Image (cartoon, rainbow, N blue to C red):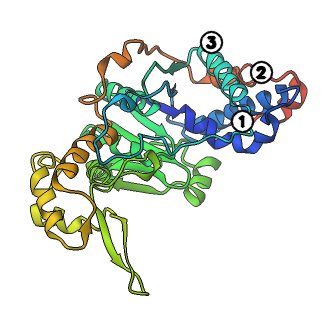
């Protein structure tokens, strides 16, 4: 079995767990210790749970946000809002305490030999891009753990079976479409032994296998935008309601399939076909919103905002990158250290393994 690294979207992991204990971080509390211990325990339980589920893993890397170089790029005139400016935090919560607890947890992960990556102006997605490319090129399999479907553009597959895949319990595991189902022995290479309880449970409850063309994600987001990151569509569509009123609505990937088919658009010719794409869209009366110049500027800007590629991301962001061999058993052996819980007696009863 080839070596396999789990790359964890750390900020997503934190935010997806914090809702269960936000009441312990309300602003003005005298003591945040219970909340800090609870979130650190949740993070540790989640990590051990994944190690138990995906038995092929022999390494874990955690990545964190450190700002964004994308926010420093001058936006087109048609953009009235900033990249990711639509994301807000609950003002009733003391986020300094939450981030502080997360900092402590990440430092303890480092102390047991795990790689934790972050740097100024680099988003977690940038680090996931870096590690998935580097490890894949070194012949290691990579599983990315996050609900962020932007990361699906990173899936890869090589004829020797080496892969980069994305895992999330509701979506299952996502592979590049080139992955040969007959050669992957799908569940066997992920989980072993074959008759384990985890294997049976995942087959019945979680693990759906998807095969995608990752470059479609990039092209769709360039044209149609990404509401989650406040990236605008380069065009809007005019729609008539049942009452006869004409409104503008967001263009979906399905809407511009006609254009892709008519111009034979592939990722290899996508950028070269920019002007033809814009001309096609402008000839359709159902599309509206921007002039040719605006659309061209937004096209170029959106490529930088949505594409996860080492050809676009500034190389200097990864100067601190350092990977070292890690014994994944250390996560289980140091579970109490990661939780940093003073009540060790009750913690032993709650061990997830």
Disc sitting over residue 42 in the figure: 1
Task: Give the Cα distance between marks 1 and 2.
Answer: 11 Å
In this picture, residue 147 sits left or right of residue 322? right
Who is closer to the viewer here, 345 or 90? Answer: 90
Judged from the image, the secondary structure of the residue bearing numbered disc 1 is helix
Q: Which mark is residue 340?
A: 2
Quadrant in the rendering for residue 150: top left
- Quarter of the image that includes the C terminus: top right
Gap between marks 1 and 3, in whole Å?
Answer: 19 Å
> Label 3 to label 2, Cα distance in Å?
13 Å
| First in residue order: circle 1 vs circle 2 | 1
Asked which quadrant contains residue 254, the reply is bottom left
**Neighbours of disc 3 within 10 Å: few (<14), some (14-19), many (20+):** few
Query: Is there CB contact under 8 Å for labels 1 and 3?
Result: no
Q: Position of residue 35 (x, y in %)?
A: 80, 32
Residue assigned mark 3 = 111
Lower sequence index among marks 3 and 2: 3
Q: Is residue 87 above or below residue 233?
A: above
- Secondary structure at badge 2 equals loop
């Amino acid at each position: 079995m080839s070596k396999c690294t789990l790359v964890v979207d750390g900020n997503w992991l934190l935010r997806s767990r914090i809702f269960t204990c936000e009441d312990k971080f309300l602003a003005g509390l005298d003591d945040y210790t219970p909340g800090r211990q609870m979130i650190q325990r949740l993070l540790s339980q989640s990590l051990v749970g994944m190690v138990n589920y995906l038995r092929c893993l022999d390494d874990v890397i955690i990545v964190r946000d450190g700002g964004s170089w994308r926010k420093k790029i001058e936006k087109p005139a048609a953009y009235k809002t900033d990249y990711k400016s639509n994301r807000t935090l609950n003002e009733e919560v003391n986020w300094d305490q939450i981030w502080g607890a997360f900092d402590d947890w990440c430092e303890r992960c480092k102390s047991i030999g795990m790689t934790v990556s972050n740097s100024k102006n680099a988003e977690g997605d940038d680090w996931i891009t870096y590690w998935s490319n580097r490890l894949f090129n070194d012949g290691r399999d990579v599983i990315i753990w996050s609900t962020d479907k932007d990361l699906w553009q990173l899936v890869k597959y090589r004829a020797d079976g080496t892969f980069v895949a994305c895992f999330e319990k509701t979506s299952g595991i996502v592979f590049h479409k080139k992955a040969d189902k007959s050669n992957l022995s799908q569940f066997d290479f992920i989980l072993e032994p074959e008759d384990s309880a985890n294997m049976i449970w995942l087959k019945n409850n979680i693990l759906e296998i998807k095969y995608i063309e990752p470059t479609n994600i990039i092209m769709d987001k360039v044209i149609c935008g990404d509401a989650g990151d406040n990236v605008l569509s380069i065009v809007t569509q005019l729609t008539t309601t049942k009452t006869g009123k004409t409104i503008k609505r967001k263009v979906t990937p399905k809407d511009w399939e006609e254009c892709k088919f008519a111009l034979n658009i592939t990722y290899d010719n996508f950028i070269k076909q920019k002007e033809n794409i814009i001309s096609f869209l402008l000839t359709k009366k159902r599309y509206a919103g921007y002039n040719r110049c605006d659309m061209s500027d937004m096209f170029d800007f959106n490529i930088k905002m949505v594409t996860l590629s080492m050809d676009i991301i500034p190389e200097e962001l990864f100067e601190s990158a350092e990977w070292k061999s890690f014994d994944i058993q250390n996560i289980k052996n140091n579970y109490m250290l990661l939780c940093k819980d003073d009540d060790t007696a009750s913690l032993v009863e709650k061990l997830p393994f």
